[in-house]
Image (cartoon, rainbow, N blue to C red):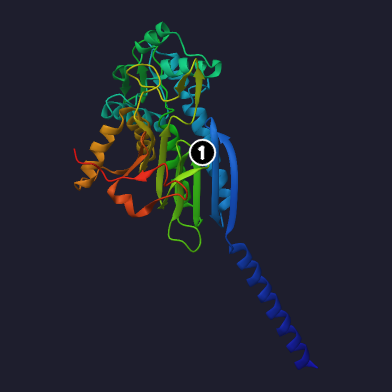
Amino acid sequence: MKAKTQKILAAGAALALLGIMAASLLLRRDRVVERTDFLMSTVVDQKITGREAEKTGDRVVEMLQELEHTLSLYDEASEIAAVNAAAGRNAVTVSEGTYKLLKRSTALSAETGGTFNLAIAPVTLLWHDAMEAKHPPEPAAVSERLRHIDYQRIRFDDENRSVMLEEEGMALDLGGIAKGYAAALAGEIYREADIRTALISIGGNIYCWGAPKGQDAYRIGVRDPQGDAGDPLLIMSLTDKIIASSGAYERYFEYEGTIYHHIIDPDTGYPCETDLLSVTVIADDGALADCLSTSLFIQGRDAVLDILRRQQAGEDIGYSLIIVDETGNIYVSPALTSAVSLAEGKESAYRLAEIPPK
């Protein structure tokens, strides 16, 4: 009887142990979380796989909400709005992250010859109203706003971490860099979390971490600039990179037979005239990728081909490019050629072209 009781107890203990192990394995199983939010004035999509997928997605959303309240041109309580409101009068102390981003943005404005310009807000605000009214602004209004976009008149005080716009009427707009910067911050959160893979799109600025099960990289679609959203022109295999694209297809209106898109040339104050359909920049640095995608779109085909020739000669410039010109030629950085292919059905309108000599 005693031996029988011991066997029963042993069997019960074994079953309990199996139950604990099963519960433990269940807790350790990867979860897949997909969510869509509207943040930073755009759609944000996340797909995360891992034990901490849900918590990690929440952390990213909290970070984006904080950035939106800090960097928004349109939020009167933001640090950027405070700097803009004090233009021509006094300096404003800002948080460390905002201060560093503003200094970086000023440096990038200089490096791109002003084709990226963080002081463009007086003009972009004018065109923001024009987009809503579907009517271009008066030329005199554009000329007046252009007088107030000199990024060299931004003053920084490192000791007090303060920023001052020297002239009344100046204003800052980080819209051309903030989403790429945010994608990079999301990447930091993903890499520190207990997750296996993650992909985020912030208004088309994409960061991918890890790779889907059974694959060694994510397969990312580059939009057809003459197609609908979700219609890929190219497929590229990447991981742990930020992808930023610019093109005239995102926001535009037509007035009296003329198309007015949202990418403004700081030299003219009007939507840029370019011989490119789209520019995609792939980099580790999200702020750089976002900034350059717009800057190079404005600069045009010849400027980008010069960069590609430098890469072809072996120069490492810290990022890769995919450009589509108005004739349907697609030019790709040499380091990317093996990772990029045309999407099915695109061969009749587009072609992967060799980088032409100077």
Seen at 51% across and 30% down, the residue is: 68
Seen at 48% across and 49% down, the residue is: 190
Towards the viewer: 56 or 161: 56
**Identity of the residue furthest to the front in this view:** 348
- Spot occupied by residue 243 in the image (x, y as percentages of width and height): 41, 43
| Label 1: how many Cα within 10 Å (few below 14, some 14–19, many 20+) | some
Q: Which corner quadrant holds the C terminus?
A: top left
Towards the viewer: 311 or 81: 311
State the residue position of label 1. Answer: 63
**Identity of the residue furthest to the top in this view:** 140
Residue 168 at least partly seen:
no
Towards the viewer: 343 or 218: 343
* Quarter residue 159 falls in: top left
| In this picture, residue 306 sits left or right of residue 176 | left
**Identity of the residue furthest to the right in this view:** 1
| In this picture, residue 296 sits left or right of residue 217 | left
Question: Looking at the picture, does residue 336 appear above or below residue 229?
Answer: below
